[in-house]
Amino acid sequence: MFAPSVGEMARDAAVAVADAQSALKKKTAVSRSWILLDCTGEGTILDVDKYAIMHRVQIHARDLRILDPLLSYPSTILGRERAIVLNLEHIKAIITAEEVLLRDPMDENVIPIVEELRRRLPPANVHQVLGDGRENLSGQHEEAAEEDGSPFEFRALEVALEAICSFLDARTTELESAAYPALDELTSKISSRNLDRVRKLKSAMTRLTARVQKVRDELEQLLDDDDDMADLYLSRKLAGASSPVSGSGAPCWFPGSPTIGSKISRASRASAATIHGNDNDVEELEMLLEAYFMQIDGTLNRLTTLREYIDDTEDYINIQLDNHRNQLIQLELFLSSGTVCLSLYALVGGIFGMNIPYSWNDSHGYLFKWVVIISGLACAILFIVIVAYARHKGLVGS
């Protein structure tokens, strides 16, 4: 046919380059997608690079690298001076004292977390106070809100921990619902199909166990270190930085927020003892982490029970296979003994069937009958003796 022209080749090359650039832009857009949730639960989609995020929350590039979806970092909870870096499976977030930055908000696993954050980030007393217009400015309501409300960063952290624990628990339930029937079917019928099915389920269980174990270890590490838990008290550190004791003003990275001023004053009044030297009071966070540690530990125990059930099934299958193997060995022993006896019987017949002249064969034909009978009985007795000896030595079952 006709060769393509230079213009057609150039046009095709331009189309290929445009497609590559479009794919690269889409990939970059996904990796730069964030959602910003403030203390009122309002969300804003951000399409910014890592430098803008680093400048906004004042963290290092090595901390932001943990949240890179292209890199496989294990589950981590890091407390920094003014932010909490959170990497729990698909939940990659940065929590400050007044906002939450969540990566990839359009992901199907992240969308429910965004909705839950919007629902639970505003303090419960805010809805109560706004619903009662007559007492909206009452000092008693404000005082009750100060006592009952948890710090903003703890509410966001609780949503993330609850989401990841529920996610891993749901994956464990799905694995259990598929594994136990498959294992029961394998015990009833050993086949290549059932063995391959159990092999895939065991691989999935091993991967899920590693994920659950990492989250549990991270929570346990936090619970064992008071200093690490104290680093997560962002509101306390913010209140300490803005208190008269420290002599410094509010950080410049909170640009004119009306909520942060009231939050600073509440934290200053509620934790005056903390500012004056009780910085290791981490009881509230310890109770929060311990609750989800128990939940993730229960999930790990379920996976451990499933692993033990799989190991027991494997032992049962090996016992069955060993039993079949022993039965085959017994059958081989019987066949070998019978073959030896028949060979002896054939030897006698072969000797008498040889074309060798001997005189006593003449007019004594009846002797051949007795030779055959006696040889058969001797071979049968020999076979019985071999089997009895094998049973006496425990080589075959009774």
Image (cartoon, rainbow, N blue to C red):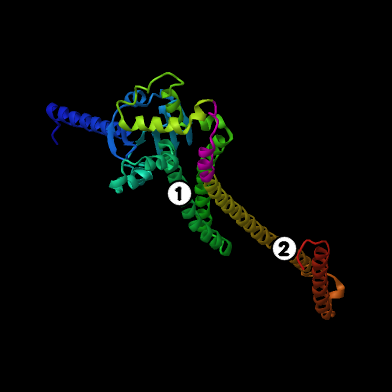
Left/right of residue 355 with respect to residue 174 in the rendered view: right
- Relative depth, front residue between 260 and 300: 260
Query: Is residue 29 covered in magenta?
Result: no
Task: Specify whether residue 333 is in view.
Answer: yes
Q: Quadrant of the N terminus?
A: top left
Q: Is residue 68 visible in this depiction of the protein? A: no
Q: Which residues are magenta?
A: 277-292
Please report the residue visible at 46 percent of the width from the left and 54 percent of the height from the top.
174
Q: Position of residue 133 (x, y in %)?
A: 28, 46
Circle 1: residue type: Ser
Residue drawn at x 30%, y 48% is 131
Mark 2 to mark 1 CA distance (whole Å): 54 Å
254 displayed left or right of 208: left
**Is 362 drawn above or below residue 86 in the view shown?**
below
Quarter of the image for residue 332 reads bottom right
Determine the residue positioned at 34% across, 37% down: 39
Towards the viewer: 81 or 369: 81
Identify the element where label 2 is drawn. helix
Disc 1 secondary structure class:
helix
Q: Position of residue 355 (x, y in %)?
A: 77, 67
Q: State the predominant SS element of the stretch in magenta.
A: helix
Residue 330's disc is 2
Which quadrant of the figure contains the C terminus? bottom right
Labels 2 and 1: the sequence-earlier one: 1
Pick whichever, 223 or 192, lies toward us.
223
Counting from the top left corner in percent of width and height, residue 82 is at: 42, 27
280 within the magenta span: yes
State which quadrant residue 16 falls in.
Answer: top left
Q: Where does label 1 land, which residue?
A: 166
Q: Nearer the viewer, mark 2 or mark 1?
A: 1
Say which residue appears at 37% left-offset and 39% top-offset.
139
